[in-house]
Image (cartoon, helix red, strand yellow):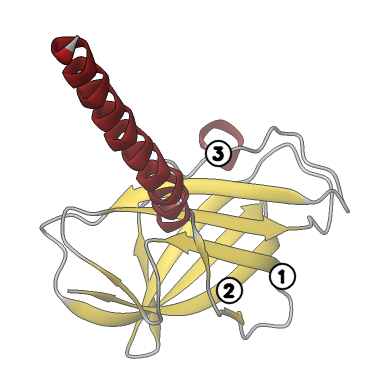
Protein backbone atom coordinates (compact mmCIF):
# COMPACT_ATOMS: atom_id res chain seq x y z
CA UNK A 1 0.00 0.00 0.00
CA UNK A 2 2.77 2.43 0.95
CA UNK A 3 4.71 1.52 -2.20
CA UNK A 4 1.61 2.17 -4.31
CA UNK A 5 1.21 5.62 -2.73
CA UNK A 6 4.90 6.40 -3.35
CA UNK A 7 4.55 5.35 -6.99
CA UNK A 8 1.47 7.53 -7.38
CA UNK A 9 3.30 10.48 -5.82
CA UNK A 10 6.30 9.95 -8.14
CA UNK A 11 3.93 9.60 -11.06
CA UNK A 12 2.20 12.89 -10.18
CA UNK A 13 5.54 14.65 -9.79
CA UNK A 14 6.63 13.31 -13.16
CA UNK A 15 3.37 14.48 -14.76
CA UNK A 16 3.76 17.98 -13.26
CA UNK A 17 7.36 18.21 -14.52
CA UNK A 18 6.29 17.13 -18.00
CA UNK A 19 3.44 19.64 -17.97
CA UNK A 20 5.85 22.41 -16.94
CA UNK A 21 8.18 21.47 -19.82
CA UNK A 22 5.28 21.52 -22.27
CA UNK A 23 4.17 24.93 -20.99
CA UNK A 24 7.74 26.22 -21.43
CA UNK A 25 7.91 24.86 -24.99
CA UNK A 26 4.59 26.51 -25.80
CA UNK A 27 6.33 29.89 -25.37
CA UNK A 28 9.80 28.96 -26.57
CA UNK A 29 8.90 27.55 -29.99
CA UNK A 30 6.97 30.62 -31.24
CA UNK A 31 9.78 32.85 -29.97
CA UNK A 32 12.36 30.84 -31.91
CA UNK A 33 10.22 30.86 -35.04
CA UNK A 34 9.73 34.61 -34.79
CA UNK A 35 13.45 35.20 -34.42
CA UNK A 36 14.12 33.04 -37.50
CA UNK A 37 11.62 34.98 -39.61
CA UNK A 38 12.88 37.74 -41.87
CA UNK A 39 12.74 41.28 -40.56
CA UNK A 40 11.25 44.14 -42.58
CA UNK A 41 13.97 46.69 -43.25
CA UNK A 42 13.91 50.34 -44.18
CA UNK A 43 15.26 50.87 -47.67
CA UNK A 44 15.40 53.56 -50.33
CA UNK A 45 14.41 53.30 -53.96
CA UNK A 46 17.39 53.59 -56.29
CA UNK A 47 18.06 57.19 -57.30
CA UNK A 48 17.52 56.67 -61.04
CA UNK A 49 13.83 57.40 -61.70
CA UNK A 50 13.77 54.71 -64.41
CA UNK A 51 13.96 51.89 -61.88
CA UNK A 52 11.19 49.63 -60.71
CA UNK A 53 10.24 49.68 -57.05
CA UNK A 54 10.22 47.09 -54.29
CA UNK A 55 7.06 47.17 -52.17
CA UNK A 56 8.69 45.43 -49.17
CA UNK A 57 12.12 44.07 -48.28
CA UNK A 58 12.81 41.52 -45.55
CA UNK A 59 16.30 40.46 -44.48
CA UNK A 60 17.28 37.95 -41.84
CA UNK A 61 19.11 38.30 -39.61
CA UNK A 62 18.68 42.06 -39.39
CA UNK A 63 17.05 42.97 -36.07
CA UNK A 64 18.27 46.58 -36.38
CA UNK A 65 19.76 48.77 -39.06
CA UNK A 66 22.24 49.03 -40.50
CA UNK A 67 22.11 45.27 -40.98
CA UNK A 68 25.25 43.72 -39.47
CA UNK A 69 26.47 40.37 -40.72
CA UNK A 70 29.25 38.16 -39.38
CA UNK A 71 31.69 36.16 -41.46
CA UNK A 72 30.34 32.66 -42.06
CA UNK A 73 26.74 33.76 -41.63
CA UNK A 74 23.96 33.01 -44.13
CA UNK A 75 21.73 35.97 -45.00
CA UNK A 76 18.16 35.45 -46.25
CA UNK A 77 16.50 38.06 -48.46
CA UNK A 78 12.88 38.46 -49.57
CA UNK A 79 11.79 41.22 -51.95
CA UNK A 80 8.15 41.93 -52.77
CA UNK A 81 7.64 43.74 -56.08
CA UNK A 82 5.23 44.13 -58.98
CA UNK A 83 6.79 43.76 -62.45
CA UNK A 84 6.45 46.72 -64.80
CA UNK A 85 6.29 44.49 -67.88
CA UNK A 86 6.07 40.87 -69.00
CA UNK A 87 9.32 38.92 -69.26
CA UNK A 88 10.65 35.40 -69.73
CA UNK A 89 13.72 36.18 -67.60
CA UNK A 90 14.52 37.74 -64.24
CA UNK A 91 18.04 38.32 -62.96
CA UNK A 92 19.22 39.50 -59.57
CA UNK A 93 22.19 41.87 -59.36
CA UNK A 94 23.85 43.19 -56.21
CA UNK A 95 26.34 46.04 -55.88
CA UNK A 96 28.28 47.56 -53.02
CA UNK A 97 28.46 51.34 -53.39
CA UNK A 98 32.06 52.31 -52.58
CA UNK A 99 33.01 55.99 -52.87
CA UNK A 100 29.91 56.49 -55.02
CA UNK A 101 30.89 53.73 -57.44
CA UNK A 102 28.79 50.53 -57.73
CA UNK A 103 31.02 47.45 -57.40
CA UNK A 104 29.37 44.22 -58.57
CA UNK A 105 28.90 41.41 -56.05
CA UNK A 106 28.43 38.15 -57.96
CA UNK A 107 25.56 36.10 -56.58
CA UNK A 108 25.82 32.32 -56.83
CA UNK A 109 22.11 32.21 -57.68
CA UNK A 110 21.53 35.24 -59.92
CA UNK A 111 18.88 33.62 -62.16
CA UNK A 112 15.72 34.45 -60.23
CA UNK A 113 13.65 32.18 -62.49
CA UNK A 114 15.60 29.14 -61.27
CA UNK A 115 16.82 29.96 -57.81
CA UNK A 116 14.01 31.80 -56.05
CA UNK A 117 10.33 31.36 -55.39
CA UNK A 118 9.50 32.94 -58.76
CA UNK A 119 8.36 31.01 -61.83
CA UNK A 120 9.03 32.62 -65.19
CA UNK A 121 7.60 34.02 -67.35
CA UNK A 122 6.55 36.91 -65.12
CA UNK A 123 3.57 39.12 -65.91
CA UNK A 124 3.14 42.87 -65.60
CA UNK A 125 1.13 43.76 -62.49
CA UNK A 126 1.57 40.33 -60.85
CA UNK A 127 2.64 40.62 -57.18
CA UNK A 128 5.80 38.54 -56.71
CA UNK A 129 8.17 37.67 -53.87
CA UNK A 130 11.81 37.03 -54.74
CA UNK A 131 13.64 34.85 -52.19
CA UNK A 132 17.36 34.29 -51.99
CA UNK A 133 20.21 33.73 -49.58
CA UNK A 134 23.94 34.31 -49.61
CA UNK A 135 26.87 33.48 -47.38
CA UNK A 136 29.10 36.13 -45.85
CA UNK A 137 32.46 34.66 -46.82
CA UNK A 138 35.57 34.87 -44.64
CA UNK A 139 37.34 36.60 -47.55
CA UNK A 140 35.02 39.64 -47.35
CA UNK A 141 36.58 42.64 -45.64
CA UNK A 142 35.03 44.13 -42.53
CA UNK A 143 33.25 47.14 -44.00
CA UNK A 144 30.27 49.48 -43.80
CA UNK A 145 28.67 49.79 -47.21
CA UNK A 146 25.46 50.76 -48.97
CA UNK A 147 24.08 47.82 -50.94
CA UNK A 148 22.11 48.28 -54.18
CA UNK A 149 19.93 45.30 -55.14
CA UNK A 150 18.31 45.07 -58.58
CA UNK A 151 15.87 42.66 -60.18
CA UNK A 152 16.16 42.99 -63.96
CA UNK A 153 14.11 41.51 -66.78
CA UNK A 154 16.31 41.93 -69.82
CA UNK A 155 17.11 45.64 -70.03
CA UNK A 156 14.07 46.58 -67.95
CA UNK A 157 14.55 47.11 -64.23
CA UNK A 158 11.71 45.56 -62.20
CA UNK A 159 12.85 46.54 -58.69
CA UNK A 160 15.80 48.46 -57.31
CA UNK A 161 16.57 49.57 -53.77
CA UNK A 162 19.46 50.42 -51.46
CA UNK A 163 20.10 49.74 -47.79
CA UNK A 164 23.06 50.15 -45.43
CA UNK A 165 24.90 47.11 -44.09
CA UNK A 166 28.04 46.21 -42.21
CA UNK A 167 30.26 43.15 -42.27
CA UNK A 168 31.67 42.81 -38.78
Structural distance between the alpha carbons of marks 2 and 1: 7 Å
Point out residue 79 in the picture as x, y percentages from the top left corner: 60, 58
Regarding residue 108, the answer to whether it shows in the image is no
Give neighbour class at mark 3: few <14, some 14-19, many 20+ (Cα, 10 Å). some
Q: Are marks 2 and 1 in contact (CB under 8 Å)?
A: yes
Give neighbour class at mark 2: few <14, some 14-19, many 20+ (Cα, 10 Å). many
Residue 158: image quadrant is: bottom right
Structural distance between the alpha carbons of marks 2 and 3: 18 Å
Regarding residue 125, the answer to whether it shows in the image is yes
Q: Pointer 2: what residue?
A: 161
Give whichever of 158, 137 is nearer the camera: 137
Q: Residue at x 66, y 49 (%)?
A: 129
Q: Pointer 3: what residue?
A: 116
Label located before the other in sequence (1 or 3) = 1
Q: For this view, does 57 lie left or right of residue 121? A: left
Label located before the other in sequence (2 or 3) = 3
Name the quarter where the C terminus is drawn: bottom left
Residue 53, disc: 1
Give whichever of 36, 115 is nearer the camera: 36
Query: From the viewer's perspective, is residue 95 above or below residue 25?
Result: below
Amino acid sequence: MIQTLRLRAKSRTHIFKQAAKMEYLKFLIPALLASAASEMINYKDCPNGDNGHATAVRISPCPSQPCSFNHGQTVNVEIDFTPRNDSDTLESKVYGILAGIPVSYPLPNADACKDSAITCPISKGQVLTYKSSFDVLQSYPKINVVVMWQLNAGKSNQACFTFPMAIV
